[in-house]
Image (cartoon, coloured by chain):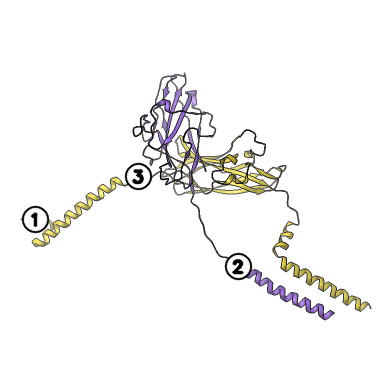
Amino acid sequence: MLKRHCIKIRGCHCEPKAWQSHIRNRQHIKLLVVALLLGLLFIPASAALATSVDRLSLCNLEGCPGDAVEAKITLEGTDLEERSGYWYTHYKEVEGDDDRMDITSWIAIEPEEYTIREGETKVFTIKVKIPGDAGPGLWGATSEEAGVAGHSDERRTYIIFKDAITGGNVYSGLLIPVSVKVVGKPSPLAPAIKFVKENIMVTALVVVIVVLIVVLLRRGKLRKAS
Amino acid sequence: MKKRILALAGVLVLVAVLIVPMVVLAAVNDATQTASTSKADAINIRAQDYTTAVADITFPEGAPGATVSDPSNDQPETQILGAEGTAKPVVTLVNTSAVAYTVWYNIEAFSEGVVSSENYVIIAKGGECLNADAITESATLDGSDHVCTGTITTIAATGDGGEADERDLYLKITLSALAGKTGTSTLTILGES
């Protein structure tokens, strides 16, 4: 009967041994299907992720009074859903701060608003316009160590990005500290001095050669004159 | 004398000719090193399963002046106050970055002036939040960024052995005396490394 059934269903001529093997195979397939279904139950749903950024501080940017210093910062969308957000500046006021700590008015972020999808990257330009009358030294933080993780107490000026699933009211984001080292106006001879310092041996040889040639030419002239 | 000077100049030129290629050779004889850092994710605001994203938090209707401590998220899951293992936060905070963060919050004032005050508390994953009185930290409804206060104010880097990279956030509001109004606000959780 089993054999007949086999013939009827599969349209093949199976011997009893082959039939038993066939039954075992079918049992294995059933077990495999059950195991797969059970496995699916334990696969976690893909976790939602917030937007990521490529730098956690913009500290010790260098520039002269009147300069505009630029830095780039990139956001990457990692959430399954589109997120909408914006950038803004923040000053963390601490009692006793002097006027060097709040440099939010120096900073412009372009573009300020954004939407970002999973896998998308967006580059933003942070422009820091140093006023012409800014004195030399550190601005926006109390120490050059402010950019190091955990040095929150030394930070005062930040840029912040925050976003939410488009249409949502729950935002997340990161604070990124900003500080600027204002240096004095450089001398117009600075490039020449830098070149000489970098090529000191060659420069010294050239100078000696030139001096010798001048001496030679002068001697020649003197001989001719005499 | 002239010959001597010419000889010296010749030697110096020779030395210069020899030194320049040596300097160039030294300059190009650099080894290349490669290093990389991971990107930093913002703190994730998730549902009670610490996995699903949350877009909205809604407080149910209450009588004017009442305290409402059973908000729900858009999954939808409702905040449950109770002992360890029973309590369920309105949202969870998850850090997927390799750096620890100090947690900041920012809550704007509710439109229509429907809420007079808001409180929050951040606790360890799965911890107890027995009742509304346990939601102790006072939020400033001014839309400004503030460092979180309370026992827990930080979230550890991802993969922390003690599950300190996952936190529970509980909220409660006190409604104003205005009746028949509905207001909206935004909640922001920021991280600082």
Write down the residue under mark 3. A45
In the rendered image, residue B145, in percent from the top left (x then y), is placed at 54, 34
Q: Secondary structure at mark 2?
A: helix
* The C terminus of chain A, quarter of image: bottom right
Q: Which residue is nearer to you in this view: A148 or B175? A: A148
In the rendered image, residue B32, in percent from the top left (x then y), is placed at 55, 63
Q: Residue B28: give its label.
A: 2
Rendered colour, chain A: yellow
Q: Is residue B146 left or right of residue B158?
A: right
- Spatial distance from mark 1 to mark 2, Cα to Cα? 81 Å
Query: Is disc 1 surrounded by few (<14), some (14 to 19) or many (20+) residues within 10 Å?
Result: few
Residue drawn at (39%, 35%) of the image: B127
Identify the subunit bearing mark 1: A
In the rendered image, residue B116, in percent from the top left (x then y), is placed at 49, 23
Q: Amino acid at mark 3?
A: Ala
Mark in front: 1 vs 2: 2
Inspect this view and state whether residue B86 appears.
Answer: yes
In the rendered image, residue A122, in percent from the top left (x then y), is placed at 51, 48
Q: Secondary structure at mark 3?
A: loop
Quadrant of the rendered image containing residue A29: bottom left
**Sooner in the amino-acid sequence: mark 3 or mark 1:** 1
Q: Amino acid at mark 2?
A: Val
Residue drawn at (12%, 55%) of the image: A9
Quadrant of the rendered image containing residue A28: bottom left
Q: Residue A5: give its label.
A: 1
Count of labels shown? 3
**Residue B104 in the image: above or below residue A29:** above
Q: Is residue A56 left or right of residue A136?
A: left
* The N terminus of chain A, quarter of image: bottom left
- Spatial distance from mark 2 to mark 3, Cα to Cα? 52 Å
Residue drawn at (25%, 50%) of the image: A36
